[in-house]
Image (cartoon, rainbow, N blue to C red):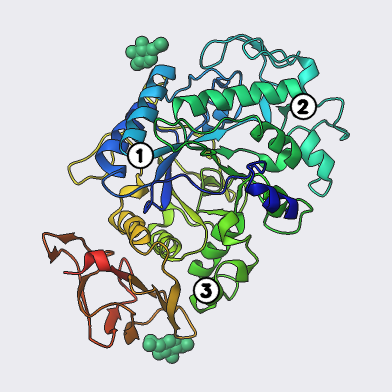
């Protein structure tokens, strides 16, 4: 790392921690499984006007089509080639989305699946989203092309060829993740093919990458690929801008591979964040919100400027990946809004908001037997359009958490308080807490079972503010509760423990 810092000035050091969002836009939203055509519309009609910085999209490259369970969402994590056609759309539609989103200042972040190809049992044929031929059995992917030489079979030392022991670093990185054919990323040929794919996306205008399954690749192999990447397209980004990199490293502690192993390449996904925040807001394990006073590094998380944070993601919202039962999702909407509100108010990490589809969740013996179900689909298998209702919510089973007033207004809050320090913490040694962001914003939570009525120092200029959780400021009126800050910065907050949203937030742009 020391050498890395020395070399930074001469441009030899690669790591890219800057999200490449426009100044003052501080969050991205994951529009899980959305079609490119719908994302383009959403950038223009909603994300740009509401200050979202970008969109994480589902993997855009060709994937296997699985039919024994009809097109599960996870088939998109089983590549067949690097051609840009999926259920979300083809290359023409992809280019149109990137251009239109960039043109309104909302950037696109690609979920890059580069650790592996499809599952070993995916068969042979043209059952892939662009119709490319492949044979999983012979590890033949002519549309790339990759052949048997380009996979790690010789290197993997586990009995089954799969990862069996997460305490064995070489197994985790050289063997198959749940049967997925593991690419030999130490080969320059394989690295070049992956880099070619990512550079194609950079040329089109994307701003960065989520590196899927990074934990299952050697950090130096990821680095070798990143070293081959171009700077971002100067049509939208200043010359010399590197793509934003955030790596999926599931590290809940207790395993030899840690998030910090990957810092030289970029940020990492901090999975402890959502697991712990869910535990606190649910009040499990004796946790209480008062303990959040040192949230962030104080809880054993990676440094703030290395963290990509989220309350839930597409995996752990349905019991996959990591985090367990504590993860809060739209299914627990009351607690979820508080958790997302806390995340967006708190300065730690770069924040990603989840936007989901509803699925027929069905627990049998504690397990959701429908955790595989893919996005809302028409009878011909194509993904349903995201329709917008008159009240601005979404139809066709798209949940659109990012359009919930409480969440959307907290995305704006985070933009308004950007750069302001964590300040004026207050708690009642239980689950009533409050904190500010310098003199720009203040948020108060009552997650106790009794009502709250307190006078708190907000740090804000005197005046009348609109609570952006219960309403919106419209034409200098507030459609929700008002908060009066006196000359000394104090304000009275009354929050019923029975309220649907037992929290309030004010900021200087919502002053009446
Ligand atoms: C891409 O998809 C659109 C919409 O379905 C279609 O009109 C167009 O012909 C397709 N383009 C290519 C190159 O396949
Ligand atoms: C905060 O919680 C304590 C219990 O820890 C309770 O006695 C007190 O009334 C609460 N404070 C407020 C302001 O409600």
- State whether residue 31 appears in this view: no
**Residue beneath disc 1:** 398
Residue 261, x across and y down, in percent: 73, 50
- State whether residue 407 appears in this view: yes
At horizontal 52% and vertical 73% (from top left) the residue drawn is 292
Look at the picture and state if 260 lies above or below 394: below
Residue 85, x across and y down, in percent: 48, 19
> Closest to the observer: 263 or 166?
263
Secondary structure under tag 1 reads loop
Mark 2 vs mark 3: in front: 2
Secondary structure under tag 3 reads helix
**Residue beneath disc 3:** 292
At horizontal 45% and vertical 23% (from top left) the residue drawn is 87
Number of marks in picture: 3
**Residue beneath disc 2:** 184
Residue 162, x across and y down, in percent: 79, 34
Look at the picture and state if 60 lies above or below 420: above
At horizontal 21% and vertical 40% (from top left) the residue drawn is 389
Q: Of callouts 2 and 3, which one flags the residue occurring earlier in the amino acid sequence?
A: 2
> Closest to the observer: 320 or 313?
313
């Amino acid at each position: 790392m020391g050498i890395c810092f020395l070399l930074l000035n001469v441009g030899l050091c690669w790591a890219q921690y800057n999200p490449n969002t426009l100044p003052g836009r501080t969050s991205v939203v994951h529009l899980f499984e959305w079609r490119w055509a719908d994302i383009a519309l959403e950038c223009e009609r909603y994300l740009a006007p509401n200050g979202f910085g970008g969109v994480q999209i589902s993997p855009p490259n060709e994937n296997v089509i699985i039919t024994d369970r009809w097109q599960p969402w996870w088939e998109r994590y089983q590549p067949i080639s690097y051609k840009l056609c999926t259920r979300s759309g083809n290359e023409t539609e992809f280019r149109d989305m990137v251009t239109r989103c960039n043109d309104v200042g909302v950037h696109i972040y690609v979920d890059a699946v580069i650790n592996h190809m499809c599952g070993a049992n995916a068969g042979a044929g043209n059952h892939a989203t662009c119709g490319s031929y492949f044979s999983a059995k012979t590890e033949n992917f002519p549309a790339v092309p990759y052949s048997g030489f380009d996979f790690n079979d010789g290197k993997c030392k586990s009995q089954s060829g799969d990862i069996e022991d997460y305490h064995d670093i070489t197994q985790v990185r050289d063997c198959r993740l749940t049967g997925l054919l593991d690419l030999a990323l130490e080969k320059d040929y394989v690295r070049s093919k992956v880099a070619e794919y990512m550079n194609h996306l950079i040329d089109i205008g994307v701003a960065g990458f989520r590196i899927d399954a990074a934990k299952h690749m050697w950090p130096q192999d990821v680095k070798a690929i990143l070293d081959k990447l171009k700077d971002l397209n100067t049509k939208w980004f200043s010359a010399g801008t590197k793509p934003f990199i955030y790596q999926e490293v599931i590290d809940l502690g207790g395993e030899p591979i840690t998030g910090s192993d990957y810092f030289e390449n970029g940020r990492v996904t901090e999975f402890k964040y959502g697991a712990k925040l869910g535990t606190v807001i649910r009040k499990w394990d004796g946790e209480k919100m008062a303990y959040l006073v040192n949230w962030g590094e104080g809880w054993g998380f990676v440094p703030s400027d290395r963290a990509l944070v989220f309350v839930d993601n597409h995996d752990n919202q349905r019991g996959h990946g990591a985090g367990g039962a504590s993860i809060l999702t739209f299914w627990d909407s009351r607690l979820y809004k508080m958790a997302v509100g806390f995340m967006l108010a708190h300065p730690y990490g770069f924040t990603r908001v989840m936007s989901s589809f509803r699925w027929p969740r069905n627990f049998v013996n504690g397990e959701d037997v429908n955790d595989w179900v893919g996005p809302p689909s028409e009878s011909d298998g194509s993904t349903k359009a995201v329709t917008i209702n008159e009240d601005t919510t979404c139809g066709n089973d798209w949940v659109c958490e990012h359009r919930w007033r409480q969440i959307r207004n907290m995305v704006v809050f985070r933009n308004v308080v950007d750069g302001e320090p964590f300040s004026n913490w207050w708690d009642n040694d239980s689950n009533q807490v409050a904190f500010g962001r310098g003199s720009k914003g203040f948020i108060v939570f009552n997650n106790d079972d009794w009502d709250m009525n307190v006078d708190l120092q907000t740090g804000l200029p005197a005046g009348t503010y609109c609570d952006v959780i219960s309403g919106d400021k419209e034409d200098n009126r507030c459609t929700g509760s008002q908060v009066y800050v006196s000359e000394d910065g104090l304000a009275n907050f009354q929050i019923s423990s029975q309220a649907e949203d037992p929290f309030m937030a004010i900021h200087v742009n919502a002053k009446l």
